[in-house]
Image (cartoon, coloured by chain):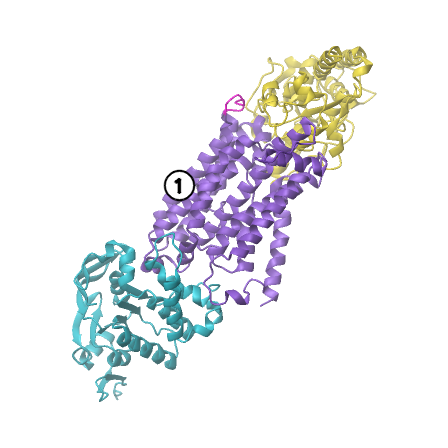
Amino acid sequence: MYRLQIAPRLRSLAVVVALSGSLGIALGVTGAVSAATKAGHFPVTVRLANGVVTIPARPTRIISLSPTATEDLFAVGAGHQVIAVDNDSTYPRSAPVSALSGYTPNIEAIAHYNPDLVVVSGNEGGVIAALAKLHIPVAEEPATTTISGAYGEIASLGALTGNSAAAQRLISTMRARIAAVVAAVPVATRHLSYYVELDQTYYSATSATFLGQIFSLFGLHNIADAASGAATGYPQLSSEYIVAKNPRLIFLADTLCCGQSVTTVRSRAGWSTMSAVAKGNVIGLNDDIASRWGPRIVVLAQQIERALLHLSQQG
Amino acid sequence: MWVRSARERGVPSSCQPWQLLVGVLFLVGVMTLAALIGPADLPLGGVISTLLEKLPLLHVHSTLSVTDQQVVWQIRMPRIVLGALVGAMLAVAGATYQGVFQNPLADPYLLGVAAGAGLGATLAIELFPRTTSWPVSPVPLAAFAGGLVAAIVTFLLGRSGGRYRATATLVLAGVAVAAFFTAVQTFAQQRNTQNLQQTYAWILGGLTTASWQQVEIVAPYVVISAGVLVAYRRVLDVMSVGDEEADSLGIRAHRVRLVTVIFATLGTAAAVSMSGLIGFVGIIIPHTLRLVVGSSYRRILPLSVLFGAAFLVLADLLARTIAAPAEIPLGVITAFFGAPFFLMVLRRAGGSR
Amino acid sequence: MSVRVRDLTVSLSGRVVTEAVTTGIDRGGWLGIIGPNGAGKSTILRAIVGTIPYAGVVEIEGRGDIHHDRRESARMIAYVPQRPELPPMMRVCDYVMLGRTPHLSLFATEGPRDLQVVEEVLCRLELAHLRDRTLSEISGGEAQRAVLGRALVQEASVLVLDEPTTGLDLGHQEQVLELTDELRHERGLTVICAMHDLTVAGQFCDRLTLIDRGRVVVEGAVAEVLTPDRIRKHFGAAVEVVDDGVGGIIVVPRRRPRQR
């Protein structure tokens, strides 16, 4: 067997672990910008997951091998400094998608771009050490499990690219919008149960995951939490458990990967009698948004808000 | 040993009625147990009344809520029945491959069937990732086709090695074909990392999404294939003296091998197309039976059907209950509990000689 | 049943192994096929049994088409290979029962008549007490009797044996051959047997066919075939041929006088 558990939102990590045996564990808080550094003044020194990184001058040839980092870079206004992004960086559309892979990075292909900063989400294939040998600065912005960690990565990418002020403005806006969305939800809809689906074989995410934390902002109760001891935060649930728990809301984070929709959920054996299915409280999410920890978590929060408002109107 | 009791001394090793009865009772017992237990924690009486309600002529009404009835009848039962079908097929196919190739390690993986099915599933996931509106998912169909193609390629390559070394050549051809198909599959996966999750879920195997529809698709293949293979049980014993001696006894060994391999592969491909790749069943069940009831395929084949089915239902019961409400991949369970059990039987059989 | 072989040519992997072999034996006779190692003795037997493709004619009782139907052929000719495959876990009675295969249709199981035939053969060959042993649990001589038993329950009238005494000690060699000869007389069997021991061949056979490099050198009665000259020429051995006085021939190796 390849591995015991799949962590679907960390599918890149898990798969690379399975394929190459190299394990990149994301630990610690990233983006502690050194106090001595002012925005826009180089050289800049930032403490990241891969240690202290010093950038001598404002980078203009950035490569991002992380879809989340790509979104962060463009959101803080560093988009024009980016020359290439990996083949899974699907957003924003203006990002210069290349054939580079974030899972099986090819050092030679990366070096060929002559980059002055490479952003990765993990040390797949020993990419960090390999780039260090070529004296190419690397910023590791790993998958985070907290919302503040996501803000930290935006801040650090702002500092590394000379866009600190824009990054701080972005973070403030995001905080404000999320707070507004949460406040708009009626108290009555809090503590309702929900199930968030990562693929059609019922892999889910518990409240301990980054995705689960967004739902926790609204006080919702995650039915996957009962299985939290069994898995890494991404347990595979039994169909009969989900049906028996009868969650009030079903969120599908597998609309793009696996083609799931309200229709497919209704056609599943035994699911049509569930209250969420019968009352139309099955919400399709964009898998990419639900699996990244970038600026579009605001969009995700807004989708949850709309679902809760819709449900509260049903009485 | 209880197997060679006094009353069957000197009788040829045909399958004894009491052995079949033990197998049937065990299977029914395991399936009943599996129907009663699950993460939804339903009352026993309710589950029983729900099942009895489905039987004709009985006027029993379920005491469960509509949702709980759905859990029992739409989720639990198809899962149990699909598990039984897949387990029976993998075990009887494993026994057949071991018989016709005279290779104790032969199982559905040997001929590249599993690798071919894996490639088929991967390509289907890559090419048609959003085809859930189709009446039948393309993934099992492609897995089925891939498994068959791999078996055919293996057979064509293996046959060219000359008549008398055909068995060894075939096994080597199977290894090569499996390696090639696995390489292509890995390449296809790497090209489109977006769909890795789906592919891996399928490769890990499991019955989490079993439905009556899947049962209806798989059942004819399994019933026909297993039926044909069991009908060949006496002939497989003849095959154990080698091709030339079997020929001299009036059996066309190559034709028998071709026909049985086709049916074993057909059934296996159908089974793994729904369940994903579940290892070990095709090795453990026939070998365990061999140690308990002797080496005759007259016993091993029919009993493989019964005990293979029971084993996989039991393994799946564990997969969905040990860490409930989380699931454990079925392939992990079959290997984890199957291997030590096998070793235990091996030791006991060795000690009693 | 009489067996006639005419112009038998066998090519294996593109190499001609036997060429234009013609020989035969009447009903109830014992034909010995002799010749040095690699002469093609086993190949001729396999062609007669019909397990390898050949050019030429193999006739059983005047019929040349018996190999078209494998089951029918197996009801006429029983075969004991030189190194039979003995599945170690198989019980003796199950192994002997395999010989009933040509009398059963593909998916049938044995009936009372089949069990009776097996029972009689097990008793005749003194295997009855071993019937529940597995093949790995019995001696070489017992195993050879089991193989013979399997051939006998085929109830074929032609018995083809490929060096049936290979690997047996002197006593068991004699036992197996005497048993074969007794059965031949009891059941009117025609025996075709490849043999490497010329004395044994000279004592048991009615007729001999000497093969060398895939061709028949000479075919005829024992005394005509076994001459010191031929044995020196085709086996490269110096021997003396002695009449045993009761119709058989003894071939004694004799060292060449030393050249001083």
Whether residue B80 is situated above or below residue A138 in the rendered picture:
below
Q: Which residue lies at the image location 27% right of the left edge and 64% below the top edge? A: C77
The quadrant holding residue A44 is: top right
x then y, percent, for residue B98: 47, 52
Whether residue C155 is situated above or below residue A221 in the rendered picture:
below
The quadrant holding residue A164 is: top right
- Quadrant location, the C terminus of chain A: top right
- Tell me the element at label 1: helix
Residue A135, visible in the rendered structure: no
- The kind of residue on which mark 1 rests is Val
Q: Is residue B168 magenta?
A: no
The quadrant holding residue A243 is: top right
Whether residue B12 is situated above or below residue B135 in the rendered picture:
below
**A11 left or right of B170 in image:** right
- Residue under numbered circle 1: B153
How many numbered circles does the render carry? 1
x then y, percent, for residue A125: 62, 35
Which chain can be seen in yellow?
Answer: A
Q: Which residue lies at the image location 21% right of the left edge and 87% below the top edge? A: C243
Q: Is residue B131 magenta?
A: yes
A43 vs C26, nearest the viewer? C26
Q: Which residue lies at the image location 66% right of the left edge and 30% below the top edge? A: B69
Which chain can be seen in cyan?
Answer: C
Secondary structure, magenta segment, majority class: loop
Residue A103, visible in the rendered structure: yes
x then y, percent, for residue C127: 42, 73
Whether residue C124 is situated above or below residue B23 in the rendered picture:
below
Which chain can be seen in purple?
Answer: B
The part of the chain drawn in magenta is B128-135
x then y, percent, for residue A134: 63, 30
* Mark 1 chain: B
